[in-house]
Image: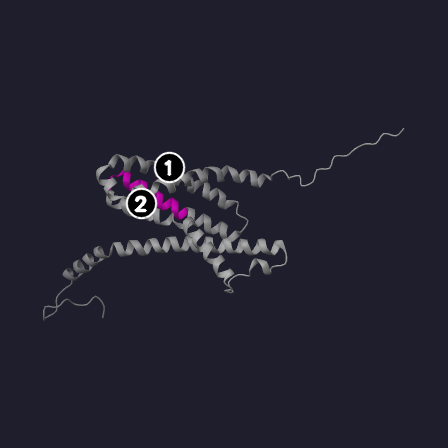
Amino acid sequence: MKSTQKTLVVFGRPKPPSPRATNRWVYFAPHVFSAILWWNLSWIQLIKWIRAKHLWLHRWNGRIQVLAMLGQIITGTGLALKSPTPGIRMLSIAYGAAMAYVWTQTVYHVLRKDIVRHKYWATKMFGYAQAIALQRVFLFFFMVLTVAGVPLYTPLDQLQSQAARDAETLQMFNDSFSMCIYSAIVLTEWYQAAEHNQLLEYRVQEAKEKLPLTGNGAAKPLLR
């Protein structure tokens, strides 16, 4: 009598995670944790009456935000190094370097108790950090344009293969990432330029007072 040997077949068995995906979690998990701290508490720093009447809250929350932003910069750069797209990888590293510089200036001036310059750089850091929030806006905008028939991207239902749909989705994601970083930096610089317009006017008046006078009492032009 022959004995039959049964074989167990398991369909849809998940593949073990790759070392690349496993290492990504080393950066991704603390990045999310730091982002949660930043996005839920950073807005408190912008409220003037808290800074005026509850300075202790502003200072302690500021310490938390400094650590949260430092965590985002380090882990975000680590995630950028693992990006499969070279252009996005370079852009992310450059953005991380810009954020690190702004973060350093913010901390440096508050340690020197130079509140005016600290406020300037802290505002810049908050503005630059809006990039990821703006990415959601741009991604939604690109999706709406695609559904509306604007020939910016190929609608996913018109693509024949899953690989083509994945490539189109990745392209949309990459474009939204590029636009969000550009927009966050430019809008921040425009905002601060408008905020310091009064200072520029003062410097213009100061420059005019230092110019030599002509015979009729008018100031000589700077350029001829």
Query: Residue 212 in the image: x percent, y percent?
Result: 14, 64
Residue 180 lies, with reference to residue 50, above or below; the image says below
In the picture, residue 10 is in which quadrant? Answer: top right
Query: Residue 56 in the image: x percent, y percent?
Result: 26, 34
- The circle on residue 122 is 2
User: Magenta region: which residues?
Assistant: 97-114
- Other-residue count near label 2 (Cα within 10 Å), few / some / many at <14 / 14–19 / ≥20: many
Q: Is residue 187 left or right of residue 156?
A: left
In the picture, residue 46 is in which quadrant? Answer: top left
Amino acid type of the residue tagged 1 in the rendering: Leu
Secondary structure under the numbered disc 1 in the rendered image: helix
Amino acid type of the residue tagged 2 in the rendering: Ala
Residue drawn at x 42%, y 39% is: 34
Locate the N terminus by quadrant: top right
Q: Is residue 158 magenta?
A: no
Which residue lies most toward the right here?
A: 1
As rendered, which of 68 and 143 lies closer to the eye?
Answer: 143
Number of marks in the rendered image: 2
Which residue lies most toward the top here?
A: 1
Per the image, the residue denoted by label 1 is 67
As rendered, which of 89 and 176 lies closer to the eye?
Answer: 176
- Other-residue count near label 1 (Cα within 10 Å), few / some / many at <14 / 14–19 / ≥20: some
Find the distance from the CA under tag 1 to the CA under tag 2.
14 Å
Q: Earlier in the sequence, mark 1 or mark 2?
A: 1
As rendered, which of 46 and 190 lies closer to the eye?
Answer: 46
